[in-house]
Image: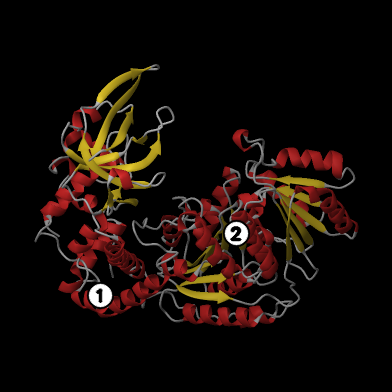
Amino acid sequence: MNMQWNRDIQYVKGVGEVKARSFRRLGVDTLLALLRFYPRAYEDWSKIYAVADAPEGIPCCVSGVLAFPPETKRLPGNRILVRTALVDGAEVLGIVFFNNKYVASSLHEGEEYIFFGKVERDAYSGGRQMVSPRFQPKGVSEGYLHPIYRQTEKLNSAAIARCVRHALELSEGQLQETLPDYLLKKYRLLPLREALWGIHFPKNEEEMESARRRLAFEELLTLELGLLARRPDGKPGVALSHSAKDFTAKLPFTLTGAQKRAIGEISSDLASGSVMRRLLQGDVGSGKTVVAAAAVYSCVKSGYQAALMAPTEVLAGQHFRTFLRFFENSGIRTAILSGSMSKKSKDALKQALLAGEIDFVVGTHALIQQDVTFRNLALVITDEQHRFGVGQRTALAEKGTDPHMLVMSATPIPRTLGLIIYGDMDITVLDELPRGRQPVETYLVDASYRPRLYRFLEKHFQSGQQGYIICPLVEEGGAESALIPAEEYYEYLQKEVFPNRRIGLLHGKMKSAEKDRVMLRFQEGQIDCLVATTVVEVGVDVPNATVMLIENADRFGLSQLHQLRGRIGRGTKKSTCVLISNNQSHDTQERLQIICQSTDGFHIAEEDLRLRGPGDFFGERQHGLPALKIADLVNDTNMVTAAHQIAEKILQNDASLSLPENAPLQEAVKQMFGEGETLH
């Protein structure tokens, strides 16, 4: 890469110190970053109308001569009004700007301009006008789609476009192609410089889409190369040769075929002498925990330690109790480490870990604290991986010397997203539910059904079953006051609806010890109905809970609703989930009906991704991946698959990307993942 492309943005012609500060706020700090700062949208300036032919009410371009110098007038409230007009033969179009004190000096009587905006009727005169249009002198790049960029208060889209144009003009003969020639030919991709011109200043939609396709492919290939480079293919690891057969033989239930297959794949990895990196993905209730327990058993019986990290104390506590049951009379010394423990208890546990007196520890983020050390950690398990950043996952692995890594996720991930998020892992999918499990029946109703639903709940309580009521808020939420808050709902239900029933409350603002206490009471049948927020979304297992009401269901994503619904139907009894929503919009009703019609988490996840897009699929960006600038994971599914396959082939032939044809890709990987990214 020519060094000038790493030049500070401040020293690019037309930028300077003031604009550079605004560019940095947009994440643009070098000349190369400016070229890669893609438009967020386009305005179609490809068709230019005469004033008489300009349609009303839709954005369009109108061309003509400025009839008179702009007139500036002060309005009450220190506002500014600027008026002028465009003439085209005998036709006149009023041009109006509000609160733009600079525009008057940019427009000159008698010169030709193109204005872009909506033609509308002046409420007072009845004449046609454009209000606050964009404009440029005629003869400057008309016939193009005009790029619209993210902007700041002191740096507008037009100024950014001027800087980008200058950078592209500089790039003549200077910009190094990033993709090997054989890929450009095979997939009919534009050369880099042509693609950059086409994405910033396309003549038409076809040119823009060709440019986007090339740049998106390059971005996805770079991402896949960076992820696959982390995969420790063939990297020496501890061979854990002790079989899990004596563990599975003593289980009080029969494993599904999928569980047997998963245990076989994991056992083979552990015994191979190479580091395992495997994702164990299974829909809600598919039985991932017993598969993980078999891996822990093999590890400990081979003479090493294992650790499992969960995202919440509630889930960590449940895992701890489950593993205690699995390992009863096995001799495996199991412990739990969480942030709410006393310092004395933590210190004692840390000493025992270091001394090798604990074989298996379950914990939260507390496990990755600097003073937590192991004697011989050989297996690391993370649950609900998408809730941890890559750095957190790595921090736990660094507690051992190249330990095996197993990631569990009950969140079904669409295949395209899975290839990206877990591109550095082998994937095992549990696609069977344990025998006796029945699909959860799901219905959508409005709030008028509540009295009937309360009677429905009471019938289940009378037969000794339990239920959940899920709310999107903990307490009264100001602007969100239309939503039902959990705390108030809990009090209302206990006093007015179920005065003779044991109602519980669980939400994220409660202290960890209090949450654990409530959850334990619910699991032991001491609470009939649990009013909760999404803190119960992950992992809580109460087979006797057979009913769930989800209030304001339209406020949740489909995958989240599926996760919540997964808290019931965990036993052999018929279970029912009811979504309550007063939102009657067509889109909302269509979205919620998807949950009613399907219990397939992978289908639901695909629909969720299609409807909400990847930006909202996980909520906050907790999965630690580089942000994509131009690739679209919803619509570029074939491109994701192709990029994954091509990246695998490239790395098979050149693992360090050191061949001359791959050097630009190596540089691109460093740019995307940071300079510290290394290739093996």
Q: Give the structural element (helix, strand or loop) at label 1.
A: loop
Name the residue at 25% across, 38% down. 90
For this view, does 348 lie left or right of residue 197? right
**Within-10-Å neighbours for mark 1: few <14, some 14–19, many 20+:** few
In the image, taking residue 570 as reference, residue 176 lies left or right, namely left
Residue 316 visible from this viewpoint? no
| Residue 467 in which image quadrant | bottom right
Instruction: Identify which amino acid the numbered label 1 is placed on.
Output: Arg
Q: Residues within 10 Å of mark 2 (few under 14, many from 20)?
A: many
Frontmost residue, 542 versus 174: 174
Q: Residue at x 66, y 69 (%)?
A: 599
Q: Give the camera-side residue of 526 and 421.
A: 421
Q: Which mark is residue 148?
A: none
Q: Which-is-in-front pick, marks 2 and 1?
A: 1
In what element is the residue under mark 2?
Answer: helix
Specify whether residue 499 is in view: yes
| Relative depth, front residue between 216 and 342 | 216
Query: Which residue has dot 2 on it?
Result: 558
Q: Residue at x 19, y 63 (%)?
A: 194
How many numbered circles are shown? 2
Query: Which circle marks residue 188 in the picture?
Result: 1
Residue 242, position as x, y percentages in the image = 54, 80
Q: Say above or below: 534 vs 103.
A: below
* Residue beneath the point at 56% across and 48% down: 346
